Amino acid sequence: MRTIMPLLFALLGAGVGVLMCKLFVRSWLAYPAAAVIGAVSAFAGIILRDGFDATLVTSNTLVDTLVAALLMSFLVSLVANIATSIIAPRK
């Protein structure tokens, strides 16, 4: 279970990355790259939450880990899409 849950959270992060890529029309970021960015950043959110032993929403570890993974995935995907749409916009 300790191995499966971070992978499921990474899959949720990949989904967030792809959805963010669909929202940005001007971004040249491809869907596989957006999925990788979302998955890696969701996993990084889990690691940061565990490293700081943070309580984000509740004292429930599962809910806090889910919130950390989705929030980090959202923020990093947002920054990546904004950066790619500013640097080289699609014509």
Image (tube, grey):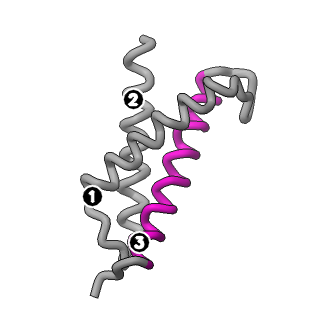
Q: Which residue is mark 2?
A: 8
Residue 18 image offset from top left, x and y in percent: 35, 55
Q: Are marks 3 and 2 in contact (CB under 8 Å)?
A: no
- The answer to which image quadrant residue 30 occupies is bottom left
Looking at the image, is 36 positioned above or below residue 7?
below
Within 10 Å of the Cα at label 2, are there few (<14), some (14-19), or many (20+) other Cα atoms? some
Residue 65 image offset from top left, x and y in percent: 58, 29
Q: Which residues are magenta?
A: 62-86
Residue type (three-letter) at the residue carrying disc 1: Tyr
Residue type (three-letter) at the residue carrying disc 2: Leu
Give the residue drawn at x 50%, y 36%.
44
Q: Are marks 1 and 2 in contact (CB under 8 Å)?
A: no
Specify whether residue 73 is painted magenta: yes
Residue type (three-letter) at the residue carrying disc 3: Phe
Q: Is residue 58 left or right of residue 81?
A: right
* Residue 24: assigned label: 3
From mark 3 to mark 2, how far is it between C-alphas?
A: 25 Å
Residue 20 image offset from top left, x and y in percent: 43, 60
- The answer to which image quadrant residue 83 occupies is bottom left
- Tag 1, which secondary structure? helix
- Tag 3, which secondary structure? loop
Q: For the stretch drawn in magenta, what is the main secondary structure?
A: helix
Residue 55 image offset from top left, x and y in percent: 74, 28
Q: Earlier in the sequence, mark 1 or mark 2?
A: 2
From mark 3 to mark 1, how far is it between C-alphas?
A: 11 Å
